[in-house]
Amino acid sequence: MAKHHMEATVNGDPVEFLCETEETLLDVLRDTLHLTGSKEGCASGDCGACSVLLDGRLVCSCLVLGCEVGGRSIETIEGMAKGESLHPLQEQFLKSAALQCGICTPGVLVASKALLERSPNPTETEVRYWLAGNLCRCTGYDKIVSAVMDAAAVMRKG
Amino acid sequence: MAETNGQTNGTHYVGTRTIRPDGVDKVTGRARFGADYNLPGQLFGRVLRSPHPHARILSIDTSRAEALPGVKAVVTRADFADQPSEFIPAGEMMMNYKDVVRNVMAREKALYEGHAVAAVAATSVAIARKALRLIEVNYEVLPHVIDVVEAMRPDAPLLHDDLFTAGVEPKPDKPSNIAKRLEIKVGDVEAGFKKADVIVEREFKTAPVHQGYIEPHAALASVSEDGSVELWTTTQGHFIVRAHCARLCGLDMGKIRVTATEIGGGFGGKTVVYLEPVAIMLSKKAKRPVKMVMSREEVFKASGPTSGATVRVKMGATRDGKFTAGFAELKYQAGAFQGSPVQPGAMCAYAPYDIENVHVIGYDVVSNRPKVAAYRAPGAPISEFAVESVVDEIAKKLGIDPVQLRMMNAAREGTKAAYGPKFGPIGLEETLNSIKKSEHWNTPLRKWQGRGVASGFWFNIGGETTVSLTLNEDGTVSLMAGTPDIGGLRAALASVAADELGVPVEKVRPIIGDTGSLGFNFLTGGSRSAFSGSMAIVEAAKQIKTELIARACKLWEAKPEQVEWKDGAVRPLGALAEKVKPMTVADFAKISGKLGGPIGGVGRINAQGAGPSFGTHLVDLEVDPETGRTTILRYTVAQDAGRALHPAYVEGQFQGGAVQGIGWALNEEYIYGEDGRLQNAGFLDYRMPVASDVPRIDTVLVEVPNPRHPYGVRGVGETPIVPPLAAIANAMENATGIRFTELPMSPPKVLKALQERGLNTRD
């Protein structure tokens, strides 16, 4: 079977890769580009562990095909920290102990970043509904929600 | 703090909210979990699973699969030697290798839908999948049984023709699906019921629920020509994985090196092996590394949920609220092989209370479901759900406040528990008091809202633990533990090591060592890893301090009584103090090449004295009478942690356990069709709580120090899942007047109950 030759931008860098028609963006990220920060928890779009931004829009990368991303821009957890400094969300997750096992954390962080980009001052309810697509089995969400709201406050101060 | 055993160190980091040492890796995507490991030349393994809930395997023909280009190995039952029947303790549960080998790969029969029947390793996942379709399995489909009560009937389809009920005299002459009957008996319950002014008897049913870790099982095995094995796997106990694989694959333990990857949740479900022995056998045949990862559907169908159960509870109390007798009959599903957590369930049932007369009967019952695995306080949430529901009903009948009634009967220091031991200092009363005093308890509710309270208990364990501390040449400290870090262990242990050695916590780098780097460790489970690990660190640090004192004496030409270890340094005393300056661990480390050589300590302990942890939960909820949907409005957890080494991660345990309990109470269940097949093997239909389903989970950290731990620590991880089921059922009763006895209290069930009583309208 002929593979598709794709060119895209991942975390600001140009990438090219070959992929089978049935390969998902998550497969491409993890297996071809070796960006294993995005996790596969379900492969059906229910857990959000594979969350990435596709042209700025939050998607489950397990529900996007690799051959759909030609010419598009993808942001993953690996692109969230800039140089030496962590993103305020990453900082706040550490300070608030908003992770236990950490498997859902990359997806939760990417989803939270997408939220704060569109809504810099979210209510608790807004945070909870926005993150309803990201399953976490360890924390009961409490410290995650606090961390997102605290990070939002930090970011508003600039 | 050191109030309990004469530690002289002032603690500095213990009890504070340090940044976890593994945190940056986890917020940047750098941390490597099970499926993130790859090796050059690796193959991809896939498992063929039975579509039938119960079938005899007449033959397996793998020849066409083996002939497919790209297929490098195929394994079936023929590749695993049979194991003798022998029960060995496995933490909180018992295990039998005869069953383990059959669960890893079906032998005579497939016993549940999803049971592994064969496995393939190929050069790509696509080829491996294609090869599975070429394996011909000739099944003789047998009648199946899913429900626990049906499985106990004499005419039920029989899973194992060699299973005779243990624990009954005389030994039955016919096999059955009842693997074991057990009994706990203290006093005389009949006499106790005679003394009672009020008796409540109820039957309860709970559904099997999955641990629901977000990371599926994954393993990468590499077997060389000389039989050496390297294995990377996501597990709660890599030393246990090594033991199981050695046994099942016929290898020497010393040949197997297991590295525990970062683990994406376990909750008990990653204490057993599924893929690991299969990956090893495939790699052994192919002589190439083999990577295997389960799909979510496989996780649901083939890895352990916990038991569903049918439970009957009968309790009696006097008019003034003293419990006089407690009876319970527990029927727990074990899945396809015996070994449900009915024993701990029976032991925990009445543990929160001081009752003179207790009788608990338990049954361990097999049926055509996946074999259960441990799930957070295995067995306890089920039995305590039933008892705590009945306690609430007694309170209502007697017109006594439910917190007060619990307080009147609460186990306290000196109470002899029905399951045997006499409790030391415990914190149940403190948790009840803190709930009673809370603003939450004293806030008014509206119509269709309800408030519920329930308490819970878990034993906690200690066990075999090895931790090493090594002083590096620059005075930094390498800490190696051997229990996988599931939720902040490294943060807690780093604080303890820093305090013990008097170094800044940032100078301690904790890692989880592989099985070749450290002595034996039992697994992360039983709420033991922080408890036992911190004890082992105290021991390792003591060795270092003793050595440093000896070196100081040599260097200073002093006698031992002229020096002391205080506040992170060896200090000269008396006249000596005018001649020499105190030396820190870093000072010694920097000159170790000239003075005595490498410095380190290894704590090798079999940790005893695990203190039980009690908790009390308080919940407010609202029922929508038109849809039957329940919304949790407010939630407070009060639990005794003994001493919280890292309060934020202790709170996290409380909160996470509570929310898992909310899922168990309201939504989660394995749904089977008439055909014996699981109908909801995915996260869309197996509905775990999401962020918008739950409110803040408030926590009250009660600290009644455990006198048998140097810092007063108790295990905290498991107790939090025990009280929610009954707390929510009690709140439902408070909101609707209906006593729900069947979990989950999902919208259809609640709506039906409301309709039956004509309550399904808002008025």
Image: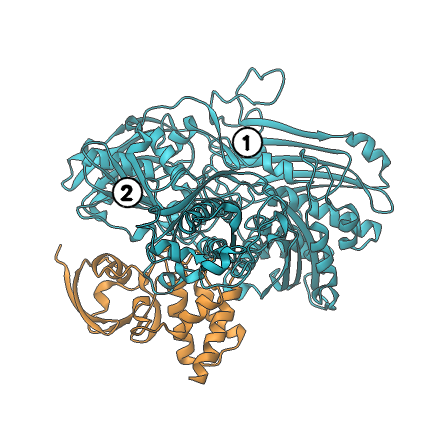
Q: Secondary structure at mark 1?
A: strand
Q: How many neighbours does mark 2 have within 10 angstroms: few (below 14), some (14-19), or many (20 or more)?
A: many
Q: For mark 2, what is the residue?
A: B46
Q: For mark 1, what is the residue?
A: B365
Direction from residue B387 to residue A99 in the image, left or right: left
For the question of whether residue B744 can be seen, the reply is no
Q: How many neighbours does mark 1 have within 10 angstroms: few (below 14), some (14-19), or many (20 or more)?
A: many
Q: Which corner quadrant of the image does residue B223 belong to?
A: top left
Query: Which one is nearer the viewer's eye here, B540 or B65?
Result: B540
- Point out residue B213 in the picture as x, y percentages from the top left corner: 44, 51
> What colour denotes chain A?
orange
Reply above or below: B414 against B759: above
Disc 2 marks a residue whose amino acid type is Arg
Residue beneath the point at 68% across and 42% down: B424
Which lettered chain is shown in cyan?
B
Reply above or below: B246 against A129: above
Reply above or below: A99 against B35: below
Query: Which one is nearer the viewer's eye here, A146 or B310?
Result: A146
Label 1 vs 2, first from the N-terminus: 2
Disc 1 marks a residue whose amino acid type is Val
Residue beneath the point at 62% across and 28% down: B182
- The answer to whether marks 1 and 2 mark residues whose Cβ atoms lie closer than 8 Å is no
- Point out residue B563 in the picture as x, y percentages from the top left corner: 51, 51
Direction from residue B509 to residue B380 in the image, left or right: right
Q: Which corner quadrant of the image does residue A30 belong to?
A: bottom left
Query: Which one is nearer the viewer's eye here, B273 or B17?
Result: B17
Quarter of the figure with the C terminus of chain B? bottom right
Q: Secondary structure at mark 2?
A: strand
Residue beneath the point at 71% across and 59% down: B434
- Point out residue B679 in the picture as x, y percentages from the top left corner: 45, 47
